[in-house]
């Protein structure tokens, strides 16, 4: 009996469709979404335990293929068998270079560094240690098959749970007609607890347990009189006639500096009343943080408080399967602030650096100092990130913002004159070739000293191995339906300022999450409330201390395996001053 017929005999049609659907929904928000690339098809098939060859992929994704539907995907799964233990055995024998029946650390390292993402020996050793039951430092056939097959089965179980949660949430959304009471976040894999302590000098304390972060425990009273006021669909619904809207865009970046967040910030001038659509999405570079995507969002603020003292108009809550966040709202004519935001869960200060420092400058045969190929590639990326309007050139304003970021100073007229004298400009703007030339001239002027060059790189978020780990570029797009001359203007790259009404950006963030979150009152502590806010990408706890004294909160999520936080540790003591403290959580996968 063939594997295909055996497969069909052990799984009925309904169960087979459910398995395909669960795998599909692990990648997409809905089965109505299309597979738009061969890579996405490969990933979707791998989610079902299939590992098709390039030849098989080309069979279904030809030069004439633009997209595949869910039904197409199911049809492919019917035709192509899942990977079996026998298939793994054959693959194992190819990896087993010396034919001794085992895979050693050296053999596996050679395979994992021959193509794709390179892995270090320590990473490969960790992989082996996880499944090396007899602790001999190598994998035998049984261990190898057990590792791969168990991973596949666990993945399928997780996909099924994710699908059930999505469908349950969809039913709840329909039933509640937009009410978000009882919303949950899928970041839990173990119980967590928050220990709430009274101010210093008091002996009383209470314990707030959270079994499924962030759902309140029986010892936390949910305030039924106060519920969220917005609907949270699990799909980013782009306006259907968006192509007819006026589009303006800008690039920008988040930077981490001494534990503080710095980013490009924008003024938005809207001459006429209009519906708007704003999206933000992290950008991929040749080397950098795209392997661990940074969450991004946008807050739209008024230029002055309304009658209730509020600046916030709206913020992005919904995202698509590719990490793009968006929001649609109606705005009256006027001036607004567009403020990018990230929770910081995957964006933390660099504690230390290890490894060999990359070489930036070398000498050619004539003794001239030139920049290396690896440094040149990074500079090309930096130019692209700094070309905020994306026209392929760097204007004086864009170069000025770059200079403020890298040196802390604006470009004076005489300094810009030096730029004009030393390189050729095109229509008064710096070309990419000219930008590279400026850095080569700097290397030549300093006779190979790279201190200033490293200052630039570190300021732009790169470490000593030329990997971006302290910055995240993003793309901001603004569409207006009824206004043709709206202006999006980059006004600074800096930490968040104080806004009208003496409001800090942290105040605005806290108030927005309190307004849209779900309240839990801590028993025995009437002046301390916990608000839980969740959206399509992360969960945030806001601890609101209404008393006049500091409160100590012990947050323990150390047993959770599928979550990271914007704080250094999942187990830490928080000192909540009068006001609010924000703690965010982001799923690892």
Image (spheres, rainbow, N blue to C red):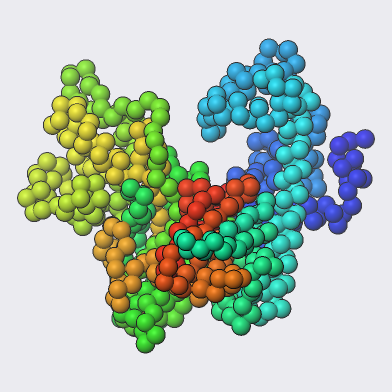
403 to the left or right of 387: left
230 to the left or right of 421: right
Q: Nearer the viewer, residue 199 or 138?
A: 199
| Residue displayed at 72% across by 50% down | 158
315 to the left or right of 499: right
Task: Inspect this view and state whether residue 486 appears.
Answer: no
What is the x, y in percent for residue 480?
40, 75
The vertical placement of 67 against 3, above or below, is below
What is the x, y in percent for residue 269?
30, 75
- Give the quarter of the figure containing the N terminus: top right
| Residue displayed at 39% across by 51% down | 473
Residue at the left extreme, as displayed: 414
| Residue displayed at 35% across by 53% down | 260
The answer to which quarter of the image holds residue 422 is top left
What is the x, y in percent for residue 168?
73, 67
Q: Nearer the viewer, residue 445 or 366?
A: 445
Q: Nearer the viewer, residue 34 or 108?
A: 108
The answer to which quarter of the image holds residue 300 is bottom left
| Residue displayed at 30% across by 51% down | 386
């Amino acid at each position: 009996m063939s594997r295909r017929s055996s497969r069909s005999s052990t799984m009925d049609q309904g169960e087979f469709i459910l398995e395909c659907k669960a795998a599909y929904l692990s990648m997409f928000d809905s089965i109505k979404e299309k597979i738009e690339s061969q890579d996405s098809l490969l990933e979707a098939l791998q989610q079902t335990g299939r590992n098709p060859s390039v030849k098989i992929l080309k069979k279904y994704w030809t030069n004439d293929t633009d997209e595949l539907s869910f039904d197409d995907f199911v049809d492919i799964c019917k035709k192509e068998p899942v990977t079996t233990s026998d298939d793994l055995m054959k693959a194992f024998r190819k990896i087993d270079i010396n034919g001794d029946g085992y895979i050693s650390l050296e053999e596996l390292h050679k395979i994992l560094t021959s193509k794709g993402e390179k892995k270090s020996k320590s990473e490969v050793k960790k992989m082996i240690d996880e499944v090396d039951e007899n602790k001999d430092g190598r994998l035998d056939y049984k261990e190898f098959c057990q590792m791969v097959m168990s991973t596949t089965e666990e993945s399928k179980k997780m996909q099924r749970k994710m699908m059930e949660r999505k469908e349950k949430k969809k039913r709840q959304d329909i039933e509640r007609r937009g009410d978000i009471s009882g919303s949950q976040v899928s970041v839990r894999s173990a119980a967590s607890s928050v220990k709430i302590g009274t101010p210093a000098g008091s002996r009383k304390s209470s314990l707030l347990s959270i079994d499924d972060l962030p759902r309140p425990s029986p010892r936390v009273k949910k305030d039924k009189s106060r519920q969220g006021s917005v609907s949270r669909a699990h799909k980013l619904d782009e306006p259907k006639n968006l192509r007819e809207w006026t589009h303006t865009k800008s690039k920008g970046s988040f930077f981490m500096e001494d534990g503080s967040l710095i980013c490009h910030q924008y003024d938005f001038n809207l001459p006429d009343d209009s519906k708007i659509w704003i999206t933000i999405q992290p950008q991929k570079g040749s080397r950098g943080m795209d392997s661990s995507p940074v969450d991004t969002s946008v807050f739209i603020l008024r230029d002055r408080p309304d009658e209730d003292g509020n600046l916030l108009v709206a913020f992005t809550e919904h995202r698509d399967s590719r990490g793009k966040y968006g929001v649609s709202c109606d705005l009256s004519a006027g001036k607004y602030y567009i403020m990018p935001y990230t929770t910081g869960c995957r964006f933390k200060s660099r504690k230390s650096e290890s490894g060999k420092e990359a070489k930036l400058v070398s000498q050619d045969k004539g003794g001239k100092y030139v920049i290396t190929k690896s440094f040149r590639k990074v500079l090309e990326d930096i130019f692209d990130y700094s070309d905020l309007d994306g026209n392929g050139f760097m204007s004086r304003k864009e170069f000025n913002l770059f200079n403020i970021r890298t040196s802390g100073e604006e470009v004076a007229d005489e300094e810009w004159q030096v730029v004009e004298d030393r390189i050729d400009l095109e229509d008064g703007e710096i070309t990419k070739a000219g930008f590279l030339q400026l850095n080569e001239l700097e290397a030549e002027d300093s006779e190979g000293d790279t201190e200033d060059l490293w200052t630039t790189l570190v300021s732009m978020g790169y470490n000593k191995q030329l990997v971006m780990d302290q910055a995240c570029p993003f793309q901001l797009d603004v569409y207006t339906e009824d206004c043709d001359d709206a202006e999006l203007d980059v006004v600074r790259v800096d930490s968040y300022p104080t806004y009208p009404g003496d409001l800090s950006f942290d105040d605005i963030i806290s108030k927005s999450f309190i307004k849209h979150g779900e309240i839990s009152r801590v028993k025995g502590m009437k002046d301390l409330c916990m608000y839980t806010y969740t959206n399509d990408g992360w969960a945030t706890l806001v601890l609101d201390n209404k008393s006049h004294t500091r409160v100590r909160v012990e947050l323990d999520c150390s047993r959770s395996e599928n979550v990271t936080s914007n704080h250094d540790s999942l187990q830490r003591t928080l000192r909540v001053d009068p006001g609010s403290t924000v703690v965010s959580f982001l799923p690892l996968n």
